[in-house]
Image (cartoon, rainbow, N blue to C red):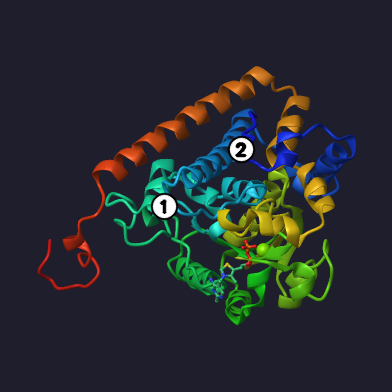
């Protein structure tokens, strides 16, 4: 895809194919026959849809970063470099009618757009417009009609909420699954253990993804977790007595395949899954501390993970599979126009639809008086 030098990590702007990484990407799937079989069954439209999902998620981040630089919003929490850990799993779920439930955290905003939330609503939520999903009250965005639980900002809590949602689904006899992601740092919140244990003993159809991006705010993984990466969480599913596995969080196909297998198990009533996505946060915790993040790690790590740029790696795989550059460029342009239009729509809301002061309490308290 096109590069955006002012808004993407320099390693991505300078990305060039690397044979070791190409082989690693292909082998992530090939070494697991069950995952390889899932990918084998994928048709071209699904493969391209996943590509569009990655590009859409990145372009929304690019737009948010541009809005920050322009002073339209004050900061943004981005998932740049971690898109595959969201887009792969979400595409493995049921979207549209009778949708599964996704409970994204800050790095998983892509789950919203991939479940069908318009990008304009994501931008409006950041701008606090009156026509945003929460009518300007909260920057957390979701849409129950599309199966998206807005993020609970207290980290770890989504694990308990999702365990409860999954229990409700099972009691209602539905064949849906619920998924949430949790950062490496947030796995240390007690409620995560409660949620996971509850899901395990009750065999609810929930999928938990530990998104190990090697850092929590400014605390490196090794400072809050005893074992060093990359196999740092691999034994956790076993510890909770549930099914799971590790996937390459920069490989959209690996995330898709492992989540598909987990979802099939959930729908068969075989209980929850704990998946571990190994990835890396290529920016700051949010847009305000990009530079601090660079100081937190050795620059070699940015170079190493920069070579694993998830969109470029997938693009390379698609080309080797015979999908033409023109096809991919055409798709990219379509998504670019879609996101560009969404930016304009949100800016129009900001110019003409900010919430009115007197509306601050409407929809907050039930009085029985208001329509
Ligand atoms: C219970 C609680 N404690 C602290 C915070 C503040 N906080 C927000 S994000 C974050 C770090 C999360 O790190 P990690 O779980 O690794 O996720 P990442 O940001 O890397 O995606 C913290 C401490 C919070 N939201 N909730
Ligand atoms: Mg983290």
Horizontal side, residue 92 vs residue 140: left or right? right
Is 263 rendered above or below residue 38? below
From the top left corner, tell me how far across and down residue 46 is, in percent.
Answer: 60, 34
For disc 2, the marked residue is: 6
Horizontal side, residue 40 vs residue 359: left or right? right
Horizontal side, residue 28 vs residue 47: left or right? right
**In-front residue for pair 343/271:** 343
**In-front residue for pair 274/228:** 228
From the top left corner, tell me how far across and down residue 361 is, in percent.
Answer: 21, 68
Q: CA distance from mark 2 to mark 1?
A: 20 Å
Most extreme residue toward the left is 369
From the top left corner, tell me how far across and down residue 336 is, in percent.
Answer: 51, 30
**Residue drawn at x 80%, y 32% as measured from the top left:** 16
**Residue drawn at x 75%, y 48% as measured from the top left:** 35
From the top left corner, tell me how far across and down residue 168 is, in percent.
Answer: 45, 70
For disc 1, the marked residue is: 126
Q: Quadrant of ligand 2?
A: bottom right
Q: Residues within 10 Å of mark 2 (few under 14, many from 20)?
A: few
Q: Quadrant of residue 150?
A: bottom left
Quick one: SS at disc 1? helix
**Residue drawn at x 76%, y 34% as measured from the top left:** 14
Answer whether residue 159 is visible to the viewer in this image. yes
């Amino acid at each position: 895809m096109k590069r955006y030098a002012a808004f993407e990590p320099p390693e991505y702007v300078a990305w060039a194919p690397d044979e070791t990484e190409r082989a690693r990407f292909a082998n992530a799937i090939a070494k697991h026959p069950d995952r390889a079989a899932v990918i084998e069954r994928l048709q071209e439209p699904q493969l391209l849809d996943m590509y569009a999902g990655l590009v859409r998620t990145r372009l929304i981040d690019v737009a948010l970063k541009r809005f920050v630089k322009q002073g339209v919003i004050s900061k943004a929490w981005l998932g740049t470099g971690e898109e595959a850990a969201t887009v792969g799993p979400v595409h493995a779920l049921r979207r549209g009618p009778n949708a599964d439930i996704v409970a994204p955290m800050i790095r998983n905003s892509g789950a919203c757009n991939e479940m069908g939330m318009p990008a304009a609503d994501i931008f409006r939520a950041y701008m606090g417009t009156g026509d945003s999903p929460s009518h300007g009250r909260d920057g957390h965005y979701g849409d129950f009609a599309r199966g998206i639980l807005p993020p609970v900002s207290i980290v770890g809590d989504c694990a308990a909420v999702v365990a409860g949602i999954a229990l409700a689904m099972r009691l209602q006899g539905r064949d849906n699954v619920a998924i949430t992601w949790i950062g490496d740092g947030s796995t240390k919140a007690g409620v995560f253990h409660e949620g996971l244990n509850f899901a395990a003993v009750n065999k609810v159809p929930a999928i938990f993804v530990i998104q190990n991006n090697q850092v929590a705010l400014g605390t490196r993984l090794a400072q809050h977790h005893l074992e060093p990466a990359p196999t740092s969480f691999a034994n956790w599913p076993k510890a909770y007595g549930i099914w799971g596995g590790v996937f390459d969080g920069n490989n959209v196909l690996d995330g898709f395949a492992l989540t598909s297998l987990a979802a099939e198990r959930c729908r068969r009533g075989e209980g929850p899954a704990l998946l571990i996505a190994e990835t890396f946060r290529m920016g700051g915790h949010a847009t305000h501390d990009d530079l601090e993040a660079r100081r937190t790690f050795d620059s070699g790590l940015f170079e190493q993970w920069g070579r694993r740029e998830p969109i470029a790696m997938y693009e390379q795989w698609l080309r080797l599979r015979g999908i033409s550059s023109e096809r991919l460029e055409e798709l990219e342009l379509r998504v670019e126009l879609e996101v560009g239009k969404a930016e304009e729509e949100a800016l129009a809301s900001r110019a003409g639809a900010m919430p009115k002061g007197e509306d601050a309490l409407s929809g907050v308290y039930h009085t029985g008086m208001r329509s």
